[in-house]
Amino acid sequence: MSNFWTILWHTYWTKIKTKSFLITTIITALLFVLLANITTIIDAFSNEETPKVAVIDETNSSIQAIERIEAYTSEEVILESVQQSEAEVDEKVISGEFTGALYLTSNGENLISGEYKSLSIADTTISSLLQTALQQIKTELTAESINLSPEQLQTLYAPVSFETTALEENAKSQEELSQARGLVYVVLFLIYFAVIMYASMIANEVATEKSSRIMEILISSTPPVQQMFAKILGIALLSVTQMLILGSIGFIALRESMSKLEGGWFEAFGFSNLSLGILVYAAIFFLLGYFLYATLAAFLGSLVSRIEDVQQMIMPMTMLVVVGFLLSMYGLSNPDTTFITIASYIPFFTPMLMFLRVGMLSLPVWEPILGMAVLIVTTIILAIFGARVYRGGVLMYGRSSSYKDIKKAIQLTKKEK
């Protein structure tokens, strides 16, 4: 057992001191700080001059187009009436004197229309604002032509009163769903990237030791099964260390900028009302998902003796994670469909889909517990089978051709006995 802990800590300390680990942690931490202060950064770049738009008004003076547009655009755009030719105004836009030019015309029925010109149409902020204003003016003019009063027009365009009510007992409200959706979305991304990154790290670790022939020395002193689980737990400890570092930095960054985030996207996506229950479920399904895929990655990595073959060997495992993530993205808007419910009990999809359902729906306690049981049983079965493959796989050298090598690895295990 002492060799087990030796391999575990060796795996942990070797990985934690690598440049890739340090660089990844630093870059991710900086990204967390950037996201926490995104409002401040956007505001810093938004302190530009108010866009200035030249207006050539060829409508009937009774329409008072410019005054009406200013009423709808508020102070977001400065409108300046010009009495010059279209070519002269276009030249001023090109020279930068104006951000753009708005040409207003009307037909015989006093219906207004416009054309907006600027150096580029990539930025649609101003054009969309002006188009919305003209649409409102057109509505007003049409109402005036059929003698509708402002009160009648307001009644006509008032939004319909519409509410959604869930009859199921303990069902979540629309507000609770909106908040849960944002939190679940973020946690799903964490599960997705963590499983792919750390499971791949285990496979690469095993392949690296085989390629350097260190494995032959380890086999003589430590049973292969102990090696496999020592590496899995070593990388797990590494992932916990990295997440604690990033989580602490993210928490501090969010706490410092909390006042600016209140009432914005931070609150809209549910990050101001973190549920302890959801966080516990997130931790449980993350750990169970990690051990499931880590065990799979360990024995797949033992089948190859060259680092170049690792990605090809673990590609099916990666595709399972990707499929699970894509299903969870679909499930964010349809969490209670039969398809998502059934898929949430398929072990390789359970970490994401069951957590999605827990976060979005009011499930009976037995469902997430059953999902955990499915993951635990599958991981045990995979560990028993994987240990047999690992024991023979670490003795195989040469280019790995296909998954038929799993059969060869099991045969080597039997011979070893």
Image: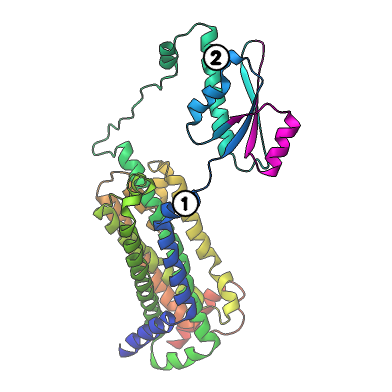
x and y percent of residue 348 in the render? 43, 59
> Taking the image as drawn, is residue 411 in sight?
no
Task: Reply above or below: 387 against 89.
Answer: below
Position of the N terminus by quadrant: bottom left
Instruction: State left or right for residue 244 relative to residue 406.
Output: left
Of callouts 1 and 2, which one flags the residue occurring earlier in the amino acid sequence?
1
x and y percent of residue 199 in the render? 45, 70
Q: Which image quarter: residue 224? A: bottom left
Instruction: Name which residue lies at 31% across and 51% down.
Output: 259
Instruction: Name which residue lies at 56% across and 71% down.
Output: 311
> Helix, strand, or loop for circle 1?
helix
**The residue stretch that appears in magenta:** 80-108
Three-letter amino acid code at disc 2? Leu
**Does residue 87 show up magenta in the picture?**
yes
Q: Which image quarter: residue 119? A: top right
Residue receiving disc 1: 42
x and y percent of residue 144 in the render? 52, 10
> Helix, strand, or loop for circle 2?
helix
Instruction: State left or right for residue 53 relative to residue 333.
Output: right
Instruction: Name which residue lies at 58% across and 37% down.
Output: 52
Comparing 182 with 53, the one in front is 53
Residue receiving disc 2: 141
